[in-house]
Image: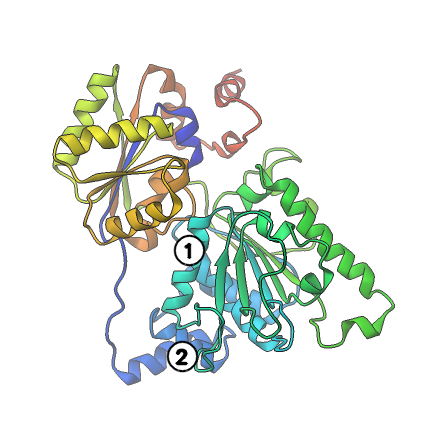
Amino acid sequence: MSLLHKAMMLLTIARARGFAARAAVRAPTTRLMSAAAWEALGLNSDMSDLVSKQWPEPNAVQRAALPALLKQEDDAVVGAETGSGKTLAYLLPAAQRAVANRRKHTPYPAALVLVPNRELGTQLRRVAARLGADTQPPFTDESKLFSLEARHGGALARWPYAPGKAPDVLVATPSFAAAFDRDLDLWEGLSTLVLDEADMLLDGGFKKQLDRCLVALKRVERRREGNDDLVEDVPERCRRVVVAATLPNQGLRSVDGLVTKYFANATRCADLPMHGVVSTLEHVFESVQSDDERDAKLNDLLESTERTMVFCKTANRASAVSERLALGGIAAAPYTKDVDPERRLATLDLFASAKINVLVCTDLAARGLDLHRVGRAARAGAAASAVSFVDSSNTDLVAALERGDTVEHAFSRRRGLRKKLRKERV
């Protein structure tokens, strides 16, 4: 819902009921039936048993994506709304292929997942841990079915893994991966490359770094042509998987246009409804005419809500709101780029465990957290409510949203929304 943040004035509140799901204890027969449901989609018996212990049944996105990702070799696009289960839909096939293509005597992973930020990498590591993966270097626990590590940041002086010590699946930011774009042995050994939150990776500040990674794969393909000696003990090709909750399609330079350009032969294996508000979310627009009125309405809402995320336009505003709430006796904490990364993770844990009730955020929390603004609520079928504070400058947008008009084109970062809405009325 980046659209709301760009066009509206500054605060969105999202209250989620049930931040984290708890796995129920099930009888052995039920567990066998659950494992069979996953195995029917193409997962092997070991992976099916592993996932069924935490997720009894595959959901719609996973049922649509898994057969294509497991039984075909083509590149793939997995598009579905936020909170719909895309992470498992791509992680399970990537891990299974990585184990099948594991090269024990090399320092490289068999699968690489590119994510835009540290927070999403941490989330993936936690999902892998729930699956029973080995997430602790040097990844020597042979009782674990696969291993995964998340890395972020800029260039290292050297590749961080010794032979036989790399995880099966490496989750990394583009800046980390691009630093090794000349290390063709890394790229040649990949069985899967995943672009998670692909709309951010393709249409933002990550694009140049992503291009370096994709060019590295092309170099590997050229190096293989006509040289059989170079392909021994490596996958026949690297499957590329594009994952996104938003795929704006207005123009050749839109995100969807870039996906078509870079991955022309990709299979759309889970192209489910996107760019909308889920039916389990109650979304209300509140008109405000001043900061004082907005603050008063915010206080009223927080008195009657459970855990709440408050989105602000800037880090300074978020810090100010957090401080004011804390002075008023409300357990609140900021979650912005100005907060140290380790403290951000600790804050998120406090919020998840209900030790603080209010998370005051910027865009940083709008992507990747398992908690997009109103998309942070009503995830995985849970019920939630959202309130967007708007002023008179947002009248056109609010009217379009309440009418249910198509506004996919408004996700573009290259042109002002107001200009687009004026063109629509002409």
Cα gap from disc 2 to disc 1, whole angstroms: 24 Å
> What is the three-letter code of the residue carrying label 1?
Thr
Question: What secondary structure is found at the residue carrying circle 2?
Answer: helix
Say which residue label 1 marks. Answer: 122
Camera-nearest label, 2 or 1? 1
Q: Give the percent coordinates (x, y) of residue 220.
A: 76, 60
In the figure, 235 relative to 186: above or below?
A: below
Q: Which residue appears at 45% of the width and 58% of the height?
A: 87
> What is the three-letter code of the residue carrying label 2?
Asp
Q: Quadrant of the N terminus?
A: top left
User: Looking at the image, which residue sits at the far front?
Assistant: 157
Residue 49: image tag = 2
Q: Earlier in the sequence, mark 2 or mark 1?
A: 2
Q: Is residue 59 visible?
A: no
Q: Which residue appears at 46% of the width and 48% of the height?
A: 273
Q: Is residue 104 left or right of residue 126?
A: right
